[in-house]
Amino acid sequence: MLRLAGKKVFVVGVGPGLGSATAYLLLKEGASVVIASRNEDRLKSVKAQLAIFGQIDYVVGDVSSMEGAKRLVHDAVDKYGSVDHLALIAGDYIDSPIEELTEEQLDRMIDANLKSPLYALSAALQDLKAGSSIVMISSVFGTYATGVRNVAYSATKAGVAKSVEVLAMELSQKGIRVNAVAPRAMNHDFVPGRDWKSLRKLGEKACPPEDVASVVVWLLSGESEWIDGAVIPVDGGEKR
Ligand SMILES: NC(=O)c1ccc[n+]([C@@H]2O[C@H](COP(=O)([O-])OP(=O)(O)OC[C@H]3O[C@@H](n4cnc5c(N)ncnc54)[C@H](OP(=O)(O)O)[C@@H]3O)[C@@H](O)[C@H]2O)c1
């Protein structure tokens, strides 16, 4: 039985990696999917690539402002009339040793990794209902691992991890779950239908995006309904 049959899922932040892999695995589980980012050409090509697997459409916009997030959610809800679940994938990375960290770099990390998922979540809330599930993307560098040269990235991904804890408690009264995954590193642009498990071994640092996307899909599905406020490391056992 398909785990998300009849569900409508909004995936915010769809690039060639995790967003595309998540959309693909959602379609394979029977969901109708709306994908979003700022790049219409990419969204068009992801839609064309994945349309054979199920119902997929796209909306174009920028969620780093509340106004932009509201507009994008409005357009997404318009596509199928409602939304059940939310995958907040949008994010960005820069190396930023503290001696060289600029205001622009710190703002860029805050905009992409903190403001974007929080504004999108806030804008979508009025359309979500009991049983809805929200998944955010942190990082092992925002949780248990300590990298160097990436203070702005790590601090903002730590903010995502804390947000999940707070929002899960805030939204539990409404029956809405909030969780996150914390990937280590993902490589290989996503290709639908490939044997992705053959591309990595336990203990390696990086995985194909499908490894992370499959946990996102599980968190969106009813199989995980007693998981709330969790940040799940997806690191293949590599803790260094
Ligand atoms: N790759 C890794 O090794 C790794 C490791 C740990 C965590 N993560 C996290 O996992 C997530 C996905 O990673 P990825 O490597 O697949 O990233 P990616 O290819 O950069 O995809 C993220 C997408 O988010 C979109 N986006 C960014 N800001 C946005 C905004 N303000 N409004 C709308 N869309 C926006 C971007 O598309 P446009 O520029 O076209 O808008 C981009 O294609 C990110 O949150 C990342 O931080 C990645």
Image: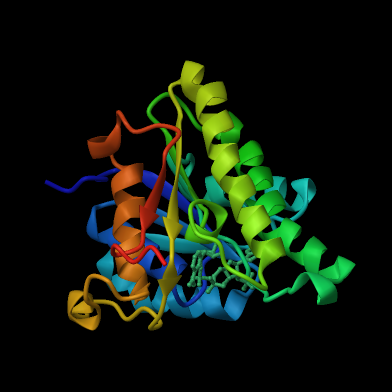
Residue 237: quarter of image? bottom left
Q: Residue furthest left?
A: 1
Left or right, 129 with reference to 213: right
The colour scheme of the drawn protein is rainbow
Residue 77 visible in this rendered orientation of the protein: yes
Q: Nearer the viewer, residue 23 or 229?
A: 229
* Image location (x, y in percent) of residue 103: 88, 66
Q: Residue at x 41, y 74 (%)?
A: 186
* Image location (x, y in percent) of residue 70: 70, 45
**The quarter of the picture showing ligand 1:** bottom right
14 is higher (above) or lower (below) than 169: below
199 is higher (above) or lower (below) than 238: below
Residue 73 visible in this rendered orientation of the protein: no
172 is higher (above) or lower (below) than 220: above
Q: Residue at x 67, y 55 (%)?
A: 155
Q: Residue furthest top?
A: 173
Residue 152: quarter of image? bottom right
Q: Which quadrant is the C terminus positioned in?
A: bottom left
Q: Nearer the viewer, residue 155 or 31?
A: 155
Q: Residue furthest right?
A: 103
Left or right, 156 with reference to 14: right
